[in-house]
Amino acid sequence: MPKMTFILKDGSHKEVDAPLGLSVLEIAHRHGVDVEGACEGSLACSTCHVIVDQEDYERISDATEDEEDMLDLAFGLTHTSRLGCQIVMTEELDGLTVTLPAATRNMMVDKG
Ligand code: FES
C-alpha cells in the first residue's frame, strides 16, 4: 500500500498508509490528522488546504479552475498549495508529502 506523510502544525512528521483512491483529506481523517474539510470534498470551502512538497506537486494532476478559485481564498496560500480533497491517491503518488498550512515556516527549516 502507498504511504504518505503529513507535516503537522508542530513540525512533526506523521507517515500513514494511503489507500489508493482515497483523497488526502480522507486519509487525514482516518489517521486523526487535523485537516478540517468543512464541505467534505465538494469544492465549497478551502479548509482542506495543504501545501504539497515541490517535487510531489509536479506529480499531481493539475488543479481545476474551481479548485484554483477556492484556493485563492485559502489562508497562507503558496505556489504549491492544493485542496486536500482534490488529491486522490494513486500508485504514482506513493511517498507524497504535504504540510498543514500553519507549519509552513517549519517546512522551510526542514529543507535547510
Ligand atoms: S473539503 Fe471543502 S474544498 Fe476540500
Image (cartoon, rainbow, N blue to C red):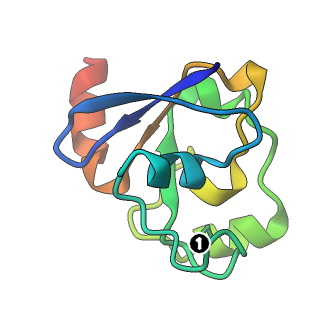
Where in the figure is residue 56, as x and y percent of width and height?
61, 27
Residue 55 in which image quadrant = top right
Instruction: Pick the quarter of the image with the N terminus.
Output: top right
Where in the figure is residue 85, as x and y percent of width and height?
64, 58
The residue at which mark 1 appears reads as 72
Disc 1 element: loop
For the residue pair 33 and 73, the one nearer the viewer reads as 33
The answer to whether residue 81 of the structure is visible from this angle is: no
The correct choice, above or below, for 87 with respect to 66 in the image is above
The correct choice, above or below, for 72 with respect to 77 in the image is below
Where in the figure is residue 29, as x and y percent of width and height?
46, 55
Instruction: Pick the quarter of the image with the C terminus.
Output: top left
The answer to whether residue 40 of the structure is visible from this angle is: yes
- The verdict on label 1 being within 8 Å of ligand 1 is no
For the residue pair 61 and 4, the one nearer the viewer reads as 4
Q: Residue at x 66, y 33 (%)?
A: 19
